[in-house]
Amino acid sequence: DMGNHQFAISDFNDSVNLFPTSDGFYYWGISKLQSKDFLNAEQDFNKALEFEGSDLNGCIYDGLGRCFHSKKEFDWALDYFDKAIQKDRDPWHVSFYINRALTQFTLGSFDEAIKDLEEGLKIPGEEANA
């Protein structure tokens, strides 16, 4: 629902302006990504990366990859998905592999897409979600 995202963006605007944090910029970027405001989402994700020691760096890079995939800039998207996978190996981030596989599939790199999906299946606890 677009209205909920607009409300969230407004709330994040107030919050981030008062207390700028990596998390705040990340979630602000996610709201903008969901609203298909890719350019501003990209800017927020890049702002989030400026903060040292964020636990969300993998997620931030994934968000950037999703922005570039949505803008059909697939080579950039792959670079960011690669960074997401390198930065964050938490099991619930199997979506990083799925997102990279979707981009590989879009580019016609079917073997690479299959490898990513197979790699995602190796993540503990994800067998039931595949």
Image (tube, rainbow, N blue to C red):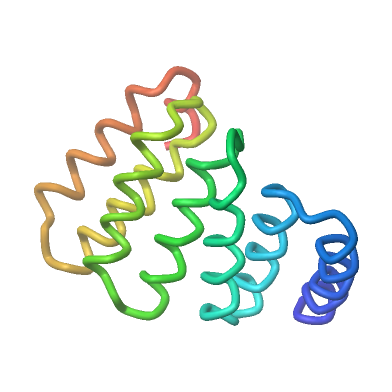
Q: Quadrant of the N terminus?
A: bottom right
Residue placed at 90% from the left, 68% from the top? 14
Q: Is residue 38 above or below residue 54?
A: below
x and y percent of residue 66 in the render?
44, 63
Residue 75 lies in quadrant: bottom left
Compared to 92, does 101 lie above or below?
Answer: below
Q: 77 left or right of 36?
A: left
When the figure is inspected, residue 66 is found, relative to residue 80, above or below; the finding is below
Name which residue lies at 56% across and 52% down: 50
Q: Quadrant of the C terminus?
A: top left
Q: Residue at x 44, y 18 (%)?
A: 124
Q: Is residue 4 left or right of residue 34?
A: right
Where does the image place residue 60, in percent across and percent down from the top left?
53, 51
Q: Front-most of 60 and 107?
A: 60
Residue at the extreme top:
124
Q: Nearer the viewer, residue 9 or 5?
A: 9
Residue in view at x 78 percent, y 55 percent: 20
